[in-house]
Image: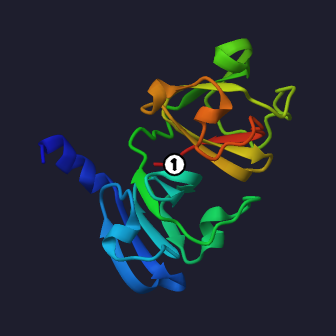
Amino acid sequence: MNTQQMEQMGKFKITVWEEENFQGKRCEFMLECQNIMERGFNKIRSIKVENGPWVGYEYPEFQGQQFILEKGDYPRYEAWSGNSSYRTEHMLSFRPIKCASHSDSKVTLYECEDFQGRKFEMCDDYPSLQAMGWCSKEVPSIKVNSGAWVAYQFPGYRGYQYILERDRHQGEYRNYNEYSTQAHTNQVQSIRRIQH
């Protein structure tokens, strides 16, 4: 392990439990986990994030629905799936979000795929894109210029969550299929910076 990896490890810490309310088998992580079942767990049902933002996934190998995990306690699945229209009662893989910088985040939304058409650059949180002037419920492509963002299917930070990072895809999401392995639509109606 090199010096940079050791420094990064101190910035990220998550503890997971196999049962709700921080019960049952537990394990601490400072690096990604591609499959919690390889650690002897059947599922993750509660989480405590001590350092750094993380993204959790419904399935192994960072597949399925995404869930943003910022500093705090998540005693049950409702705490991380929250206002999602799609609820899953477990999480099987997770990783840190290394490029999150709340104070230095910029994203550009485009009205067409491949960064075509009208665009809107933003560096703040928007609970309703339509209220700020975006004329559609859809965002066909997104370019993350800096930081990390979570886009939501519905206003008020509800619905499917899409974690968009500068250091993934070079920050370029040319169409909605690149938002997530479970992205079924380009409907994005709210967006916010990921807290670090």
Up/down of 20 relative to 54, above or below: below
Identify the residue at image location x=85%, y=35%.
131
Q: Amino acid at mark 1?
A: Gln
* Horizontal and vertical percent position of residue 27: 33, 74
**Residue 24: quarter of image:** bottom left
Q: Residue 196's x, y, as percent? A: 45, 48
Give whichever of 192, 151 is nearer the camera. Answer: 151
* Relative to 26, 172 lies left or right: right
Residue lying at 48% horizontally and 74% vertically, measured from the top left: 43
- Identify the residue shown where x is 69% and y is 65%: 87
Most foreground residue, 45 or 119: 45
Q: Furthest residue to the top?
A: 117
Mark 1: few, some, or many residues within 10 Å (few <14, many ≥20)?
Answer: some
Q: What secondary structure is marked by label 1? A: loop
Task: Judge whether 89 appears above or below 142 on screen.
Answer: below
Q: Along the horizontal axis of the image, is 47 left or right of 187? A: left
**To which residue does mark 1 refer?**
195
Judge from the rendering whether residue 160 lies leftward or rightward of residue 7; answer left or right.
Answer: right
Q: Position of residue 177 (x, y in %)?
A: 63, 34
Q: Which residue of the protein is positioned furthest toward the left in this rendering?
A: 2
Q: Which percent across, then down, holds residue 124?
A: 64, 34
In the image, residue 7 above or below residue 119? below
Q: How is the image coloured?
A: rainbow
Residue 27's place in the image compared with 144, above or below, is below
Which residue is pictured at 59% across the width and 76% down the height? 76
Q: Is residue 190 left or right of residue 53?
A: right
